[in-house]
């Protein structure tokens, strides 16, 4: 039985400014209506940075974080023909209980420029951010990093009013991300390769924004000239029915659905699930590549599933079943199912250590992005999904920042 998913669907169109939900193209054909912030706002922002330079952009306008602090996004310069749209993670909130403990269950603010610069300068940037590593599939690419501070997995456009008004949350992930994307579309019009990705909550941003990104480049040069890959890192979209019925509407994310895709427009969002979202988007863009990475017993995804009222023991089998259903219905979808409980892979140095069923992840990702053919699925269920050598190394004294997931 399919997991009634979600909001994911809303994800799909992600971000929305005024007029969301209108799928007609604007007069010049470059954006769909409702997608573009004020042209004056975009024109007044910084230009593209040179290779190796990190810039911070505070767009202002309607962008905002959950408690009213400013939103900003970051761009690390690289090859202007190869772009990574990287959606940050940072939990989620959907009711008085979860939204009143911001620092415990979701990130209410975005990092400062100083914090991001320190992250790179102190050489702590790892995984896909490790630009000096020749094994990095995106070495030398431009990275547009979209932080996250709204508790709505990059999909919302609503003011959340909880606990009789004592808890207010600006669920404006749709507005924030769409503004950053509009800037990127304007500054990088001629692109040959795109990776759309994100860890945790950012994984929903990646699949949700992918139709809008693909649509823009398809109508402005054609996807035959642009290779698009989407990798959702540790966001399988398994949620409880109670959350979907009673809490998901608080984000007002459904208005972001890409209505031009068959099976998604003019359909009650409550009749759609994660399998529908992936298969309908992937089948609409058959030349693009879609994928998920998950660990079989992801501690964070199990935690949030329980917070939504589900039984955490049900999460792993539901996740595995969802991956296989999507795979059976979309020829351009692949998955990498790893062992253990570690949440996310792209931010960690262990990305270059992860090997499942004899396939190392970095090579698998490189083939997904730039290989002539799609990689094969990688499934730990062919062996023992609980025995994780990454965590075994932690138990022997390893000190990677991913080790915190191993004892959960």
Image: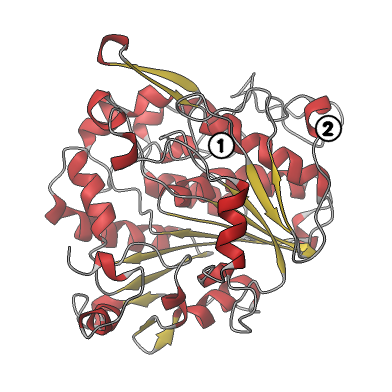
Query: Left or right of 109: which side holds 77?
Result: right
Q: Name the residue under label 1.
A: 13
Image spot of residue 356 (x, y percent): 35, 82
User: In this orientation, which residue lies closer to the viewer: 334 or 239?
Assistant: 239
- Mark 2 neighbour density, 10 Å: few (under 14) some (14–19) many (20 or more): few
Query: Where 245 sits versus 54, above or below?
Result: above
Quick one: which residue is furthest to the bottom in this view? 358
> Gap in Å between the C-alphas at discs 2 and 1?
25 Å
Q: Which residue is nearer to you in this view: 249 or 259?
A: 249
Task: State the scheme by which the image is colored.
Answer: secondary structure
Badges 2 and 1: C-beta atoms under 8 Å apart?
Answer: no
What residue is at 72 percent from the left and 31 percent from the top?
32
Q: Where is residue 159 in the image (x, y as percent from the top left)?
A: 45, 18
Q: Can you tell which of label 2 and label 1 is closer to the viewer?
A: 2
Tell me the quarter of the picture where residue 371 sits: bottom right
Which secondary structure, mark 1?
A: loop
- Report the side of 141 relative to 10 (left or right): right
Is residue 330 at least partly visible in the picture? yes
Please name the residue shown 27% across and 27% down the image: 245
Residue behind mark 2: 44
Local secondary structure at mark 2: loop
């Amino acid at each position: 039985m399919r997991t009634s998913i979600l909001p994911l669907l809303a994800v799909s169109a992600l971000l929305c400014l005024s007029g969301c939900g209108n799928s007609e193209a604007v007069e010049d054909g470059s954006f769909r209506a409702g997608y573009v912030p004020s042209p004056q706002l975009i024109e007044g922002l910084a230009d593209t940075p040179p290779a190796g330079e990190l810039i911070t952009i505070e767009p202002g306008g309607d962008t905002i974080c959950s408690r009213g602090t400013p939103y900003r996004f970051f761009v690390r310069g690289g090859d202007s023909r190869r772009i990574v749209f990287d959606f940050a993670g940072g939990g989620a909130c959907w009711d008085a209980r979860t939204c009143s403990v911001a620092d415990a269950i979701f990130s209410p603010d975005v990092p400062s420029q100083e914090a991001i610069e320190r992250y790179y300068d102190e050489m702590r940037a790892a995984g896909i951010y490790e630009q000096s590593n020749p094994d990095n599939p995106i070495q030398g690419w431009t990275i547009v990093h979209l932080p996250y501070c709204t508790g709505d997995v990059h999909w919302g456009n609503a003011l959340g009013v909880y606990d009789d008004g004592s808890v207010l949350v600006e669920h404006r992930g749709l507005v924030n991300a769409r503004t950053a994307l509009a800037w990127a579309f304007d500054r990088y019009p001629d692109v040959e390769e795109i990776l759309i990705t994100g860890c945790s909550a950012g994984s929903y941003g990646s699949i949700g924004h992918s139709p809008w990104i693909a649509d823009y480049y398809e109508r402005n040069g054609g996807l035959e000239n642009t290779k698009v890959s989407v990798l959702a890192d540790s966001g399988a979209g398994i949620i409880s029915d109670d959350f979907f019925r009673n809490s998901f509407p608080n984000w007002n994310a459904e208005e972001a659905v890409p209505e031009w895709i068959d099976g998604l427009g003019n359909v009650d969002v409550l009749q759609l699930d994660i399998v529908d979202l992936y298969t309908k988007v992937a089948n609409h863009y058959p030349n693009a590549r879609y994928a998920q990475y998950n660990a079989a017993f992801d501690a964070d995804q199990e935690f949030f599933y329980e917070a939504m009222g589900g039984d955490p023991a049900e999460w792993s089998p539901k996740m595995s079943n969802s991956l296989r259903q999507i795979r059976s219905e979309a020829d351009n979808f692949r998955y990498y199912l790893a062992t253990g409980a570690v949440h996310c892979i792209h931010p960690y140095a262990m990305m270059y250590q992860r090997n499942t069923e004899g396939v190392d992840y970095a090579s698998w990702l490189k083939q997904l992005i730039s290989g002539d053919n799609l990689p094969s699925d990688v499934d730990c269920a062919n062996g023992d999904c609980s025995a994780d050598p990454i965590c075994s190394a932690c138990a022997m004294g390893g000190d990677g920042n991913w080790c915190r997931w191993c004892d959960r």
